[in-house]
Amino acid sequence: MSLPNDLSFEPLSDAFAQDPHPYYAALRAKEGLTYFKDFDVWLAARFDDVSEVVMHEKMVRSMEYIANEEEIAEQKRAGNWHDMPHHSRFVQFSLLDSDGEIHDRLRKQVFKLFTPVMVNKLRESIQTYVDTLVDGLADRKEVDFIDDLAAHVPGHIIGRILGVPDEDCPQLRIWSENIVQFFDIDRSDERKELAERNTTEFYHYLLELKAKRETAPKDDLLSLMIEAERQGHMNHDEFFSTAMLILMAGHGSTIDVLGSGMHALLKFPDQMQRLRDNQGLMKTAVQEMFRYESPLPFFHRYCTEDVEICGQTFSRGTKFGVLYGSANRDSKQFPNADMFDVGRSPNWHIAFGRGAHFCLGNHLARLDMDIIFSTLLNRFETIELAEKSPVYKRGLSVRGPEALKIAWKRK
Ligand code: HEM
């Protein structure tokens, strides 16, 4: 397979959405990093190159290190990110998009609720919630795995961690989806207005909930952050941007990998059977789902000084695109990288990133997956694909099926 020049890399096309991997393979086969002019980025596609970029000490996520206010405003106008007062306060700024002291301080405030020990405490309540959902679907012969099941879990669980009442979680999911969608391919004024309106509604909702927790704290993330704010570790805007980020970072990504993970099991029935026969493989199977179709395949970095990286020299302010989705299919790192192997070990994939910004919610995402797939394999005798080829989402920043029709038979 050869895609000879930059013009061939069309990440917003339908063909890329259906299967980005030949495009990634072509990028990996090229020497050095590849300049992609549509996004004005240098793309790192090989595992070693992606790792080198994200671990480099002169790389940051925030533009503030490399541009002045005027230049940032100009960039925002170019991307139609301007004139969004709430979006710019609570979404365009976040711990994910900050570096150095601000990043470390914010991450420290919330980190403690996402350790393996804390996340494991949620196992029982997630299981009960998933059982209830599956009870409501089990008699149906066919379901949309995404819409009927996967979409109801991650946002709901994150909502509980934050301290959002169960009945409000569906609304949070809608806000989060509409806000996140503006990041990727559709930057129209219409979507911009929706993203700003939903950020505003989300903010007002959290403001009210915060007021309640201030008078009656609970054992939840909002109460923890209220204490952090009281002690001067977070300001008003940081409080809300962190709460929103946690929901937005973990909701869609987990739904997407649930969808592509299920699709992989259906495409490779021998692997599904292997997992059925030996559910002790669930941990490695979940890891493999993240590697095989990484749900957040693309992130960026800027260099704060002139750097020599991956054998090339780049000047200060250069923007790099790190393709986690491609790195995870690099056969130099993963033998038979295009094979889905539920027992793959070792499996040092990079779907959760690496370095300072390493995903905060990785244990939670893996627990959701473990519980859902174990439950389905235990409760259904057969699970089959009920459509020919599921349509995948368009865009470079996300990877997952729009819908996934499956037929199943309960035990
Ligand atoms: C399917 C699941 C997920 C994937 C593939 C994923 C992937 C990632 C990646 C790649 C990054 C680093 C971005 C970079 O390198 O610039 C990241 C950061 C982050 N993720 Fe996740 N994530 C997932 C689920 C979650 C969940 C469930 C939560 C929270 C409940 C979460 C919260 C965060 C946060 C707060 C950050 C920013 C960390 C920082 O900047 O220090 N993620 N995630």
Image (spheres, rainbow, N blue to C red):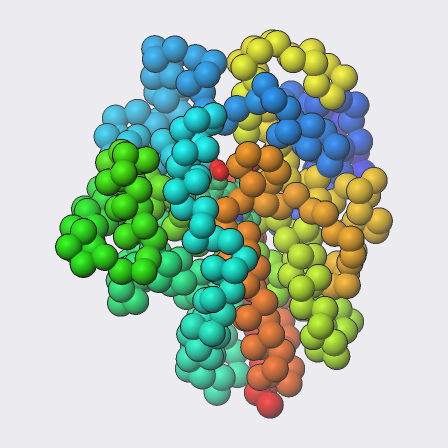
> Which image quadrant for residue 240?
top left
Question: Which quarter of the rendered picture does the N terminus lie within?
Answer: top right
Relative to 175, 56 lies left or right: right
Q: Residue at x 43, y 72 (%)?
A: 125
> Which image quadrant for residue 409?
bottom right
Is 58 placed above or below 123 here? above
Question: Which quarter of the rendered picture does the C terminus lie within?
Answer: bottom right
Q: Residue at x 70, y 14 (%)?
A: 308
Question: Residue 244 location in percent, x, y?
Answer: 34, 45
Q: Residue at x 78, y 58 (%)?
A: 344
Q: Residue at x 37, y 58 (%)?
A: 161
Question: Residue 174 location in percent, x, y?
Answer: 33, 54
Which residue is at the front of the view, 50 or 29? 50
Relative to 124, 355 lies left or right: right
Is 340 placed above or below 382 here? above
Relative to 204, 333 lies left or right: right
Is 278 placed above or below 7 here? below
The answer to whether residue 336 is visible is: yes
> Which image quadrant for residue 341?
bottom right
Which residue is at the front of the view, 405 or 175? 175
Which residue lies most toward the bottom here?
411
Which residue is at the front of the view, 177 or 215? 215
The answer to whether residue 130 is visible is: no
Question: Residue 236 location in percent, x, y?
Answer: 24, 36
Which residue is at the front of the view, 295 or 2? 295
Question: Residue 322 location in percent, x, y?
Answer: 62, 32
Count of numbered badges drawn on the protein: 0
